[in-house]
Image: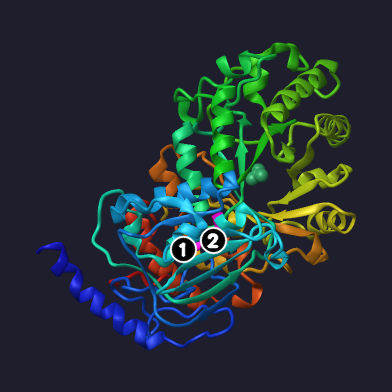
């Protein structure tokens, strides 16, 4: 059947759907989706109702007729802003392959009738990442106070278009964006994901693919877990065996790998082009077999252990009493801080079961000031609250329902004392937890985490006794003990990541599983177009089911 015929029936269904939902949610946040019977449509609507995207925008006012992208559409930018031009080029790069349109980038004034990206530094209500999108037959205008806001708005614009726009070959239109106004700002300033490149190594291109997936859902922080027992993944000139030896394997004994400084900088640059801040993590004093195996002097007994390719934790520790340990950590933090424009260096600190409590406290008291010495702020897993967290430290909570109340309270107390909290509850936000006991990949030590469970919690009230203002946001960690390929990463990340991104971005009063699951179901068209393999959770009414 020719493409045009195959698509005609679904389009009709789409139009009916549009009529059925038109007028819902005027003037306020809307999470309306799908059809009256609670099922997602079998095919995408020709015009996606305004705001029916993930994360759901803060304010949506549908109005008037849609905008139609054509061969004549131009992208208008602020010629005086290099970043505005870069966002314009990024947008054109997204839309050109599937539309086949030239989408010339011109000065804003010359883009009448097109898509205009407008910077308005006086629009302070939009904050650092907010944007306003106005769409109608006469054009689309995206306004932001800062370039990051333009970039987030571009993700909204992209999701309003049919998913076929994500394909990299010319597709049939039409390319319509529903009419009306979206005004949108994030709930939390920190919306992160973590990739463990230590247990299994992932190449620069594979990390870029992950960054692009995060960008689609307005994630703004990429935490890279760069060292662990099974591998050291970042070049440190003053300690070269960390990578030549310590980077030479991974879980299961594969060849591992590492990033040269240039490669790491390329990841940082690429993330920055997607308005994501990279937080490098060097996990100390535990999780350090790769370093201990590379340099005998880092071991208390002066004997280098073999490289470790298993998946147990808590077996390794740097030697706390030795001075060379702090020369080592100083060099590593200095070199990594110099490569990293972001604010934080993450020093791990989790599962130091082979370090005594007194040694742990001694170690953290000596190491935290090294982060400040090189101009960065400490980030660490929440065990850091067993010591005195440095001024302004970012504490990443990874407990779960069965975490002892005393441990939770210790973290809450640190938050009351000024630590910033990033919430990564393992039984909600860990992307490597199995969905069900039958999930092939992943781990289950924190329980199984189905899609609804990962979405249905409130960061503001999650940790008892922690002040709401201390919660900077959320992060979804992806540990890779069992994940070796991008297909593995995809199927654990999707479809949980979009829901976690929505928790971080969308206002609390939009939170609603029943409407979210319909919007999520529709994201499957986009996953398919992007070649993303995902878990077809029975909790989600996927199209055609
Ligand atoms: C962790 O999952 N060990 C932070």
Residue furthest to the left in view is: 1
Residue 449 spot, x, y in % from top left = 53, 60
Determine if residue 535 is in view: yes
| Viewer-nearest residue: 119 or 352 | 119
Horizontal side, residue 325 vs residue 525: left or right: right
Tell me if residue 145 comes above or below residue 265 in the rendering: below
Quadrant of the rendered image holding ligand 1: top right
In whole angstroms, how far apart are the C-alphas of marks 1 and 2? 6 Å
Q: Are marks 1 and 2 in contact (CB under 8 Å)?
A: yes
Most common SS among magenta residues: helix
Q: Which residue is mark 2?
A: 153
Question: From which residue to which does the magenta span run?
Answer: 151-157
Q: Residue at x 74, y 38 (%)?
A: 349
**Relative to 339, is 92 on the left or the right?**
left
Residue drawn at x 27%, y 64% as measured from the top left: 173
Q: Residue 334: percent from the left, percent from the top?
A: 75, 24
Q: Quadrant of the C terminus?
A: bottom left
Outermost residue on the front side: it is: 110
Q: Which quadrant does the N terminus fall into?
A: bottom left
Residue at image position (79%, 53%) is 420
Q: Position of residue 339 (x, y in %)?
A: 67, 28
Query: Badge 2: few (under 14), some or many (20 or more) residues near its Cα, within 10 Å?
Result: many
Q: Which of 138/536 is in front?
A: 138
Report which residue position mark 1 lands on: 157
Mark linked to residue 127: none
Asked whether 302 falls inside the magenta stretch, the response is no
Q: Nearer the viewer, residue 119 or 266?
A: 119
């Amino acid at each position: 059947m020719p493409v045009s015929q195959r698509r005609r029936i679904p389009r009709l269904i789409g139009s009916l759907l549009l009529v059925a939902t038109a007028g819902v949610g005027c003037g306020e946040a809307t999470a309306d989706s799908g059809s009256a019977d609670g099922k997602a449509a079998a095919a995408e609507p020709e015009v996606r109702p305004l705001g029916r995207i993930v994360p759901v925008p803060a304010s949506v006012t549908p109005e008037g007729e849609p905008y139609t992208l054509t061969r004549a559409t131009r992208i208008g930018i602020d010629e005086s802003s290099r970043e505005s031009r870069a966002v314009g080029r990024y947008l054109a790069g997204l839309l050109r392959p599937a539309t086949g349109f030239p989408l010339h980038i011109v000065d804003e004034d010359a883009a009448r009738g097109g898509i205009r990206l407008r910077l308005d530094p006086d629009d302070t209500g939009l904050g650092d990442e907010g944007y306003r999108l106005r769409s109608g037959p006469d054009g689309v205008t995206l306004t932001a106070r800062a370039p990051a806001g333009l970039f987030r708005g571009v993700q909204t614009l992209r999701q309003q278009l049919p998913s076929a726009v994500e394909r990299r070959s010319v597709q049939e239109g039409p390319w319509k964006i529903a009419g009306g106004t979206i005004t949108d700002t994030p709930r939390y300033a920190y919306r992160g994901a973590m990739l463990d490149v230590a247990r299994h190594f992932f190449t620069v291109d594979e990390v870029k693919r992950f960054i692009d997936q995060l960008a689609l859902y307005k994630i703004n922080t990429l935490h890279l877990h760069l060292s662990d027992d099974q591998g050291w993944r970042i070049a440190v000139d003053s300690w070269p065996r960390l990578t030549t030896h310590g980077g030479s394997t991974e879980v299961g004994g594969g060849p591992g790998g590492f990033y040269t400084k240039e490669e790491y900088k390329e990841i940082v640059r690429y993330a920055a082009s997607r308005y994501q801040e990279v937080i490098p993590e060097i996990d100390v004093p535990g999780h350090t077999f790769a370093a201990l195996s590379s340099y005998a002097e880092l071991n208390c007994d002066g004997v280098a252990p073999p490289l470790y390719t298993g998946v147990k934790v808590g077996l390794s520790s740097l030697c706390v009493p030795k001075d060379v340990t702090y020369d080592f950590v100083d060099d590593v933090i200095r070199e990594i801080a110099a490569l990293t424009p972001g604010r934080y260096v993450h020093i791990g600190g989790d599962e130091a079961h082979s370090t005594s409590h007194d040694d742990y406290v001694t170690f953290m008291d000596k190491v935290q000031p090294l982060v400040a010495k090189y101009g960065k702020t400490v980030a660490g897993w929440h065990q850091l609250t067993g010591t005195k967290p440095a001024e302004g430290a970012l504490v990443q909570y990874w407990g779960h329902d069965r975490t002892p109340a005393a441990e939770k309270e210790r973290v809450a107390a640190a938050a009351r004392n000024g630590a910033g909290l990033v919430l990564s509850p393992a039984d909600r936000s860990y992307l490597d937890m199995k969905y069900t006991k039958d999930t092939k990949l992943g781990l289950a030590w924190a329980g199984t985490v189905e899609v609804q469970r990962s979405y249905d919690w409130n960061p503001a009230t999650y940790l008892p006794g922690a002040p709401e203002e201390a919660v900077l946001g959320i992060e979804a960690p992806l540990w890779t003990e069992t994940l070796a390929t991008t297909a593995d990463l995809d199927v654990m990340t999707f479809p949980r990541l979009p829901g976690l991104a929505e928790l971080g971005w969308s206002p609390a009063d939009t939170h609603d599983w029943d409407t979210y699951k319909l919007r999520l179901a529709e994201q499957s068209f986009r996953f398919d177009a992007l070649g993303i393999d995902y878990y077809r959770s029975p909790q989600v009414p996927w199209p055609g089911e």
